[in-house]
Amino acid sequence: MSELFSYDVVAQDPNTHARAGVFHTAHGDVQTPLFMPVGTKGTVKGILPQTLEQIGAQVVLANTYHLEMRPSSERICELGGLHEFMQWHKPILTDSGGFQVFSHGEFFKLSDEGVRFRAVDYDGRWVSWTPEDNMAIAQRLGSDICMQLDQCPGYPATRAFVERAVELSSMWAERCWKAHTRPDQALFGIVQGGMHLDLRLRSLHHLEEVGNFPGYGIGGYSVGEDHETMFETLEPLVSEHMPSHKPRYLMGVGNPTTLVRAVGCGVDMFDCVLPTRTARMGTAFSSEGRMNLKNARFSADGTPLDHACDCPVCTSGYTRAYLNHLVRQKEILGGILLSTHNLYYLLELMRRARQAILDGRYAQFMADWMASPAAQDF
C-alpha cells in the first residue's frame, strides 16, 4: 500500500508554502493541488462523467452515508463496485459519512463504541455504526481513497466539546486503521481540533502514532467560522506541522479565494458542493467576481458568461441573457451549464496554481489573485 499510494512533491514555491505534487492511486496518478467535484449520491448533479473528464476532473467524491442508505454498499459491490456503478474510471474518494450523521440534530447518539442515528432523510430507521462497520462499507464501495470515521464539531463550540471530539476521532482512527485491510484503497486519517491549534496538534500526533496513513484530511473547518478565523490555525498547522511527504486534504472548502490562500499554506486537495449547489441557485464564479444570473441586468446581455474563461459553456455561444432566462424559468439546463462552468473554473484555477508553483512564482500568483475582482467570491 505504501508504494501504491505514495506522494511525490515535484516543486516547492520559494516564497510560500505552496507545493506541486503527484499522488499515486490504483486508478491513476493525481496532480496536486487539485479540486475534487462532489458526487454525493454517486453523481455530480446534472453532469455526465464524460463532461467531468472533458473539463479536467481528476478525482470525484462520493458520500458513504448516502450510498449506504440507498442503494447500499452491498448492492454496489454486487454490481462491480463504485467505479463501475458510476461509470467513472478515474480515482474516487469516499468520505466517512460522519458529517451527515452528525447533521441529524437530536437523532443521533454518540459513545466510545460508535454512533447510533436515525435516518430521518430516508426511511426513519435507527442505524448503528462502529468504526469497523464504517470501514466495511468503504471497502465494499471500493473507492481509491476513504476517510476514517470521525466526529466533526461545529462552530462555535466549547473547548471541552471540541476536545471530546478529538479524543473520540483519535480513538476511532485507531480502530479504523486496524479494521481497514483493502490493499488497493488508501485510508486517510482526519485531523480535528476546531480553532484550537494545540488540539489540532494533539489530533495529528495521535494519527501519526496510530499508523502510516497515506494522507491526512483536515476536518472541522468551514463549519460556521469566518475565513480569517479558519486561517489563524490552518496556516501554522499545515505549513509547520503536517508531514511534508503526504497529501493534505482540506475538507469541504470550495470558494476560489480560500483555495488560492490555502494552497499558499501548503494544502494539496480540496472538495466542496459550493460550485454545483450555488450553480443550481443561479450563481457563477467569474473573473469579475461572484455573479447572480437571476439579476435583471443580465436579461439583455448578449455576452458570454465570463470573457476570461474557456470552459465549454463560455466558448459555445451561451449568453448571460440565455442563462438569466434559464435560471429565472427554473430550467434544468441552467443548473447544468452553470455547474459545468463553476467546476471548470475551480479545476482550471488549480491547474494555473500548479503551473505557478512549478514556475516558482506562486507568491505573485496569489498577490495578483487577491488584487483582482475575481477574489470577491463570497
Image (cartoon, rainbow, N blue to C red):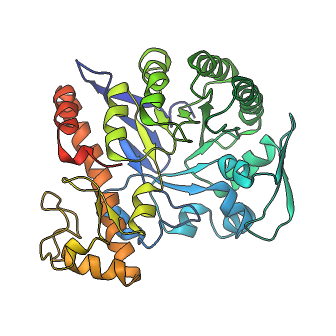
Q: Give residue 302's quadrant in the image.
A: bottom left
Query: What residue is at 51 percent from the left and 61 percent from the top?
Result: 39
- Residue 31 visible, this angle: no
- Residue 130 visible, this angle: yes
Query: What residue is at 64 percent from the left and 39 percent from the top?
Result: 154
Query: What residue is at 55 percent from the left and 48 percent from the top?
Result: 144
Q: How many labels, in total?
A: 0
Query: What residue is at 41 percent from the left and 62 percent from the top?
Result: 278
Q: Quadrant of the N terminus?
A: top right
Of residues 292 and 276, the one drawn nearer to the viewer in this rendering:
292
Q: Point out the residue furthest to the front here.
A: 296
Where residue 67 sits in the image (x, y, percent)? 66, 63
Where residue 169 sits in the image (x, y, percent)? 72, 32
Of residues 132 and 157, the one drawn nearer to the viewer in this rendering:
157
Where residue 356 sits in the image (x, y, percent)? 19, 34
Where residue 215 sits in the image (x, y, percent)? 53, 32
**Is 1 displayed left or right of 96 in the figure?**
left
Q: Is residue 364 above or below residue 305?
A: above
**Is 47 displayed left or right of 83 in the figure?**
left
Of residues 247 and 8, the one drawn nearer to the viewer in this rendering:
247
Q: Is residue 40 above or below residue 145?
A: below
